[in-house]
Image (cartoon, rainbow, N blue to C red):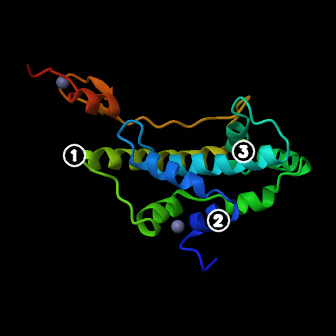
């Protein structure tokens, strides 16, 4: 692996996925709100790896099948193992894939160090990036905690559980609460001092 700059470099090469590098870069450098953070890029990339292997094994990947399988695989409970076993029985090299899935940290390394790329930040855009990163971190931590609680059977649900994080701003005077994305987009929280 030392001949490669990073794990993403190795996976692109070994999985014959070089042509997706450009899409990775484009999604990272897109203008907000299309811009994807490292965590979203890692999910996109890993799902793509899974979808290609499912296609190769002759499994259906229509209707978000790869996305939902990937979501379930990311858990570490019995559900994840059931999905992994099913994929393995169908001929998907799932153990290898799980080893090769990339983390958001390595996506960042690849984009910024291997490619030496930068996000074209117009003035003020680092703040939007920072908000995205904060949300990614919060969601990752919350997902880990929820997964653990479910494994311990201290939290139950009929199906898969999605964690979403919304950062809200509140004006201390009028108590208007607004999701930060909306506030930033429209450039105000409230007008109570008008
Ligand atoms: Zn790399
Ligand atoms: Zn106010």
N-term mark: 1 or 3: 3
Are there few (<14), some (14-19), or many (20+) residues within 10 Å of tag 1? Answer: few
Q: Marks 2 and 3: which is nearer the front?
A: 2
Residue depicted at 23% across the width and 47% down the height: 122
Residue depicted at 84% across the width and 45% down the height: 82
N-term mark: 2 or 3: 2
Question: CA separation, marks 1 and 3?
Answer: 37 Å
* In the displayed structure image, the side of residue 69 where residue 91 appears, left or right: right
Q: Secondary structure at mark 2?
A: helix
Residue depicted at 64% across the width and 65% down the height: 13
The residue that disc 2 covers is 13
Residue at the far left in the pictured view: 194
The residue that disc 3 covers is 51
Residue at the far front in the pictured view: 19
Asked which quadrant contains residue 142, the reply is top right
Question: CA separation, marks 2 and 1?
Answer: 36 Å
* In the displayed structure image, the side of residue 185 where residue 106 appears, left or right: right
Q: Secondary structure at mark 3?
A: helix
Q: Is residue 166 above or below residue 55?
A: above
The residue that disc 1 covers is 124
For the residue pair 30 and 90, the one nearer the viewer reads as 30
| Residue 21: % across, % down | 54, 55
Q: Is residue 148 visible?
A: no
Question: CA separation, marks 2 and 3?
Answer: 17 Å
Q: Marks 1 and 3: which is nearer the front?
A: 3
């Amino acid at each position: 692996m030392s001949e490669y700059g990073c794990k993403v470099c190795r996976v692109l090469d070994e999985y014959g996925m070089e042509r997706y590098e450009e899409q990775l870069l484009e999604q990272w450098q897109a203008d907000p709100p299309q811009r994807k953070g490292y965590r979203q890029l890692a999910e996109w990339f890993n799902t793509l790896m899974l979808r290609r292997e499912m296609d190769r094994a002759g499994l259906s990947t229509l209707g978000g099948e790869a996305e939902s399988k990937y979501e379930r695989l990311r858990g570490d409970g019995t559900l994840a193992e059931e999905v992994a076993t099913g994929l393995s029985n169908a001929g998907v090299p799932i153990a290898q894939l799980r080893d090769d899935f990339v983390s958001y940290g390595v996506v960042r390394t690849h984009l910024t160090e291997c490619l030496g790329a930068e996000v074209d930040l117009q003035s003020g855009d680092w703040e939007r990036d920072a908000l995205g990163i904060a949300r990614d971190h919060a969601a990752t931590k919350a997902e880990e905690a929820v997964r653990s609680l479910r494994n311990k059977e201290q939290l139950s649900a009929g199906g898969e559980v999605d964690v979403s994080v919304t950062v809200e701003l509140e004006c201390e005077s009028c108590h208007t609460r607004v999701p930060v994305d909306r506030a930033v987009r429209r450039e105000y929280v409230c007008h109570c001092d008008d």
